[in-house]
Amino acid sequence: MFHVKHFGCIIFFNGYKDENVYVQRPLSDILLILESRLLFHVKQLDKVHGLSACMISVYSMEAYLSFNILVFNKQSLGVIDSNCLRSFLMEVHFDTLCSQYGLDPSLIESARTNLAVVVSKAHRLPFFLIEYGDDNGCPLIVTESDFKSERGSCIYNDLISGDLSEDLKSHLKATNFLVEIELMQHQLSNMGLLLAYEAARWAAFKGGGIIFGLDRAWYHLNHYCAILPSE
């Protein structure tokens, strides 16, 4: 369950519920999740009785509808080097990709200027954020789990039992980790879409994986690290 006690503008958390898995975490470990998934702006204030206190101001209550690009990897991403990933994303061919995805190229400059990869302190959390100056303040959320987790196992079993070619099933059976790149609906029409697929390309290259796209089609990387259809 998710326990919240509200006293004026101070809120105390002693747990966080992600899907069906309850995890006991201090607030310092869930600030990024709350800020991005619940669209809250969070500022940590103090600690009271062993629980973290924070001030939260809601700046958007739009309906929460997310879309996920999935990457099935043989190896874990390991410790995320935020500077290295940011450099990778800065070097992509924005103009070409905007044409490919039907995006407005006038958004490129703002995305490049505001591009940042945000990881948790001491890399304690299995997710990180990619910020790019989205108008609604929403970052991309990149999460990694293994197939021993409830969520990873559920997604894996659902796909492996589907109508896949033997080649794809063989690829899936060789994977151990799931990387999810999550977008909100409005991000499908801005630089979020471009950066999400480039983050998926980076993850697949780093983890030796295959990609399940937003169009529910499978993709792999060629020798030049370009994304190609698998079927």
Image (cartoon, grey):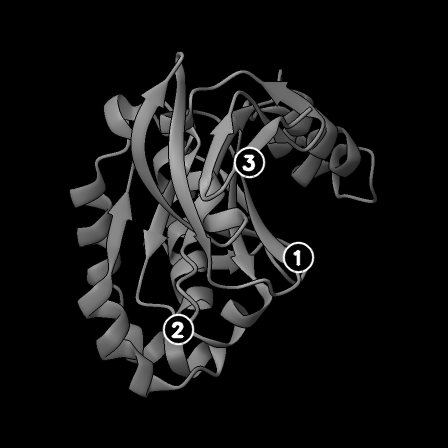
Quarter the C terminus occupies: bottom right
Q: What element carries label 2?
A: loop
Query: What's the residue at 54%, 49% (across, down)?
Result: 38
Q: Which amino acid does label 1 sit on?
A: Ala
According to the picture, the residue beneath numbered tag 3 turns out to be 6
Residue 51 % position (x, y): 42, 18
Please tell me the numbered disc located at residue 217. 1
Out of 122 and 9, give the one closest to the viewer. Answer: 9
Out of 43 and 88, give the one closest to the viewer. Answer: 43
Out of 231 and 217, give the one closest to the viewer. Answer: 217
Q: Residues within 10 Å of mark 1 (few under 14, many from 20)?
A: few
According to the picture, the residue beneath numbered tag 2 turns out to be 135
The quadrant in which residue 215 appears is: bottom right
Vertical position of residue 198 compared to residue 120: above or below: below
Query: What's the residue at 39%, 73% (across, down)?
Result: 135
Query: What's the residue at 17%, 53% (across, down)?
Result: 87
Q: Can residue 223 be seen in this view?
A: no
